Amino acid sequence: MASASSMKRPDSIADNMPNALKQSQYYMKKCFARYIEKGKRILKIQELRDQMEKVIDDKSERDKVMDGYLGSMFSSVQEAVVTPPHVTFAVRPTPGYWEFVKVNSVDLSDVKPISSTDYLKLKEMIADEKWSRDENALEVDFGAFDFSVPKLNLSSSIGNGLNFVSKFVTAKLSGRVENAQPLVDYLLLLEYQGENLMINETLSTAAKLQMALIVAEVSLSDLPKDIPYESLELRFKEWGFERGWGDTAGRVQETIRSLSEVLQAPDPQNLEKFFSKLPIIFKVVIFSPHGYFGQSDVLGLPDTGGQVVYILDQVKAMEEELLLRIKSQGLNVNPQIIVVTRLIPDARGTKCNQEWEPIIGTKFSNILRVPFRTESGVLRRWISRFDIYPYLERFAQDVTLKIQEAMDGKPDLIIGNYTDGNLVASLVASKLGITQATIAHALEKTKYEDSDIKWKKLDPKYHFSCQFLADTIAMNAADFIITSTYQEIAGSKERSGQYESHAAFTLPGLCRVVSGVNVFDPKFNIAAPGADQSVYFPYTETQKRFTSFHPAIEELLYSKVDNEEHIGYLADRKKPIIFSMARLDTVKNLTGLTEWYGKNKKLRSLVNLVIVGGFFDPSKSKDREEMAEIKKMHTLIETYQLKGQIRWIAAQSDRNRNGELYRCIADTKGAFVQPALYEAFGLTVIEAMNCGLPTFATNQGGPAEIIVDGVSGFHIDPNNGDESSNKIADFFEKCKANPGHWNKISADGLKRINECYTWKIYANKVLTMGCMYSFWKQLNKDQKLAKQRYIQAFYNLQFRNLVKNVPIASDEAPQSDSKPADKPQPTQRHAT
C-alpha cells in the first residue's frame, strides 16, 4: 500500500462507487450481507469473488452486472476488511496506486475514502483491537524525510530510477554555468589512495573548468588518437587536469567533449554516459552472510541456492567491466571485489571454514568469511536465515575492520543481498559513508499470507518482526535498489509486487509502518541478470560443446532402466522433447505440466516429456509439499499411462552437465517449458534461451518480461492447462510442417537474450548506477543525513530490542578456535 494511495485521483473509486452499487442494488445488498455475516475478518480476492458468484449464480446475469465500472472496481480489489456493518476495500487500480474505500452494508450510498493509516488500523482490529485504538501506538514514517526528493508519477515508469535521476540532475545543472558547481565540487572529491583524479583545485569553479576544457580540446584536435595519455600528462596537469580522462588522446577527447556538453547543454543520456566514464568505483564489497557460501559442494545445503550462483556470476561480470573501465580511464589500478559471508567452522566438507578463498575465473576477487560471534565465542554450526539476527551487528563491526584492512581503505560501493546481507550492508555503509545498493532476491513478506497481521503467531518460528523491519530499514538506507524485473517491484495489474507490499503494513502490538518504501522512489532500478555464457551457450557452437557429458546424457535421457537417477523411458526417440527443470513444489507446477501433457492427445503424439526435479521416493524428502508433489507425479504417470512417453530425472546440480543437457534437448528440436504458477524472475528461462532452445514460460511474473510472446518464445497461462498445452502442440505441428519455424524462434530467443539479458549488460548498468547515485547522494546529502538519523534511532530503540527475542544458538566454541588465514594476494589470476 503505497504512500501514493493518499493522493486523490481524478477517477476516484470512492466518488464513483455509490452509483455503481445502486445500479445493482438488489444483488449488492445480498452480497454485502454475506460479507459481514461471519463478523470481523479479512477477506481475500478469491473469497470476495466466490461470494459474488453464490449471490449471482447465473453466469450471464453475473457478467451483465460486472460489465462496467463495478466489474472494473472489483477486479482491482486486493482484499477487504470486514468490521460490521462496514466493509472496507483495498483497491489497486494500477500498480503502485491504492485507494481505500469504506462501504456501509446497511446503506450502500454511504461510501467514504479513508487513508492507508486508517485502513491499517481496521486490519489491526482483527488481530489486536485494544492496540489498534491506542492513540500512542508507535507509527513509523520513513516517507516523512523524502518530501524534498522528487518521485516518479506513472506506474509504467517504476524501476526506471537511473533515467529519472539523470533527467532531474540535467535540469538542475542547466541554465547558468554556476548551476554546474555541484558537479565541479563532486569532481574535486574524486581520488584514489590519496591521489587526485580528473581535476584539482586549479579548476575550482564551473567557469574555470569550462574554459580549461576548451583549451584541452583544441590541443588534442591535431593529435593522433592513439597517443598514450602519459605523453599529455604534464601539460594537462598544468591546466588543472589529473589522471582519469582516458588512456589515449582519443579517449581523453571523448571524455572532454562529454563533460563540455554536460556543462553547456546537458541531456540525460550524455550525463549517464559521462558518469559511466568517471573513475569512481574501484573497490566493491558484496554481502551475503546466510547459508553455505562457496564455489563447490554447497548447492542444496540449507539456505543455499540461486543467490550463491547469482553473486559468483555477478562478481565475474563486474570485475571484467571494472578492468575495461579502469584501463580506458588510463589508470594503473587493480580493482578489488570482496564477497563477505559467514565463516562456519562445522563446514560439512565445504570450504566454508576457510577465511579467504579466491573466486575462480577472476584476478582480483575473493570470498572473505567472518564468523558469527557472541560474548561466549564463535558459533560453529549453520543456523537458519530466520535465526540470524542476534549475530549481525557484531558481524558488521568485525567485517568493517577486515575489509578496510584488506582494501587498504574504504570500499567505493557496497551491495547487500537478501535481508541479512542488506541489513549488514546498511550498518557498514552508514559507518563508512559509502554508496549502498540492496538486492532483495526474495522478500519473505509476500510468501506468507497475512504474515504481518499474524506476526505474533509466526514469530517463534520465523522471527518475521525482525525480518520485515530489517528489510524496511535496508530499503530506506540504500542509495539505490537493484531488482530483476518490473514485477518484482510493482507486480502486475492483478498482483501487487514484492516491494509494494512494504509500502505500508502493520505489526499489531509492535508498530504501524504508515510509510515503509515508496515504489515510485527513483532509487528503484531494474538490472536483469544473465546466465553464465561459458556454460549456457547455443547448441550450434559445436566446438565449445561439453561432449564428454554426451554418454552420461544419452543414458540419462534414453536408458530404459529405472534407477535412483531416472525412471520412465522414451519409446520413440525420433520425437522432439519438451523439457522442464525446477524444484518439485506446488508453485513450480511440474505436476501441472505433466497433467497437461497427459490430457492432450495431440501433444503426446508430437513430443516426449522430460521432467527434472525432486526425488522419486517421498520418504527421502523432508518437505511435506515436495512429498505431496512426488506422490502426485507417480499418480499422474499411472492415471494417464505415460510410460514410454515420459522420463522423470532426479534433481541435477552439475551446472556444466545441465548446460549440455539443454543443448541436447535442442538437438532433438525440442523446447523448454517453465509452467510455474508464479516466477519472480526465471533464470532457467534465460539458461534455455541462451542454449537456443525455444521456450514456453509462465505469464505470471518475470518470464512475461523476458519473452516477447510469439517472437522470442511463448507465454503460457499456468491456470489454463488446456490452452497452454494446445499452444505447445500448435508450435510443434507448425514446426513439423515448416522446420524453419523452430529455427526462427530459436534465433529470435537468442537475439532477445543478447540484447537484454547478459551479465555484461547487467554489470555495465549496475556500475553506472553506482557512479550516478554516488553523485545523487552528494546532491541530497542533507536529506540523506536526516533520514539516516531517523533510521538509526529506529534501529537502536526498536529493532535491537526485537533481536533480543531471537534465541542464541548454544553450540559455541572458544574464540581462539578460529584461526584467521593470511590476507589474500589478489595479484595472480585464480585457477579456473
Image (cartoon, rainbow, N blue to C red):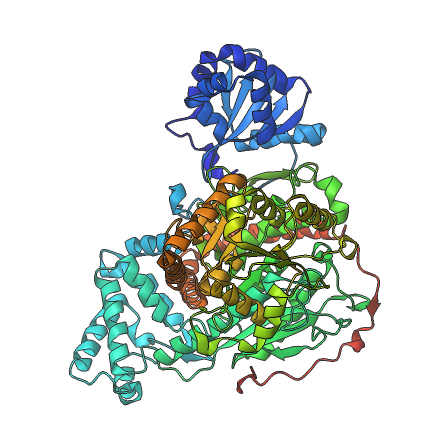
Q: Give 618 or 109, whichever is nearer the viewer.
A: 618
Reply above or below: 279 against 728.
Answer: below
The answer to whether 703 appears left or right of 329 in the picture is right
The answer to whether 715 appears left or right of 591 in the picture is left
Quarter of the image for residue 39 reads top right
Residue 198: x, y in percent? 34, 75
Q: Residue at x 38, y 46 (%)?
A: 157
Residue 230: x, y in percent? 31, 88
Q: Residue furthest bottom?
A: 231
- The number of callouts visible is 0
The answer to whether 138 appears left or right of 208 in the picture is right
Quarter of the image for residue 296 reads bottom right
Q: Give 239 or 457, whichever is nearer the viewer.
A: 457
Quadrant position of the C terminus in the picture? bottom right
Q: Is residue 810 visible?
A: yes
Reply above or below: 269 against 49.
Answer: below
Q: Residue at x 65, y 50 (%)?
A: 585
Q: Is residue 681 visible?
A: no
Reply above or below: 338 against 701.
Answer: below
Residue 345: x, y in percent? 76, 72
Residue 299: x, y in percent? 66, 66
Q: Give 554 or 156, whichever is nearer the viewer.
A: 554
